[in-house]
Image (cartoon, helix red, strand yellow):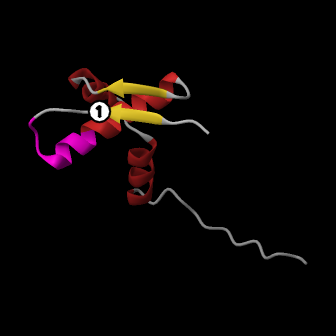
Amino acid sequence: MSASVGIASGREEAEILLRNADVAMYHATRAGADRYARFKPDMHAARLSRPGLDTELRLAVERGEFELHYQPNSS
C-alpha cells in the first residue's frame, strides 16, 4: 500500500484549499508512490493548460460521440 498526499495552506476558503490540495496530490501521485507535494500556484496553471480526461469525456458526451452497442451473453 502507498499514499500520495497533497498539502495546501493559506487563508483561502476551505473549498479553494481543498482544490489546491487535490492539485498537489495529483502532482505527488505522478511523481511516484509514497510522495507528498506542497501546492504552488504554477501547479494549478499547469493543470488548467492541458485538458484532463474528465473534460474530454464531458465534451465527447455533449458532442454525441459515444455509441452504445449491446452484445448479449451467449451462455
Give me the residue at 26% from left, 36% from top.
Answer: 20
* Name of the residue lying farthest toward the right: 75
Give me the residue at 30% from left, 37% from top.
Answer: 21
Q: Nearer the viewer, residue 28 or 46?
A: 28
- Relative side of 68 to 25, left or right: right
Q: Main secondary structure of the magenta part?
A: helix
Give me the residue at 49% from left, 22% from top.
Answer: 31
Which quadrant, please, contains the C terminus?
A: bottom right
In which image quadrant can residue 2 be found? top right
Q: Nearer the viewer, residue 50 or 21?
A: 21
In which image quadrant can residue 72 be found? bottom right
Relative to 35, residue 55 above or below: below
Let me know if residue 50 is in the magenta part: no
Which range of residues does the magenta coloring cover? 11-19
- Estimate the x, y position of residue 58 in percent, counting from the top left: 40, 54
Query: Tag 1: residue type?
Result: Leu
Mark 1 — residue?
Answer: 48
Which quadrant, please, contains the N terminus?
A: top right
- Estimate the x, y position of residue 38 in percent, counting from the top left: 30, 25
Give me the residue at 38% from left, 58% from top.
Answer: 62
Relative to 3, residue 75 above or below: below
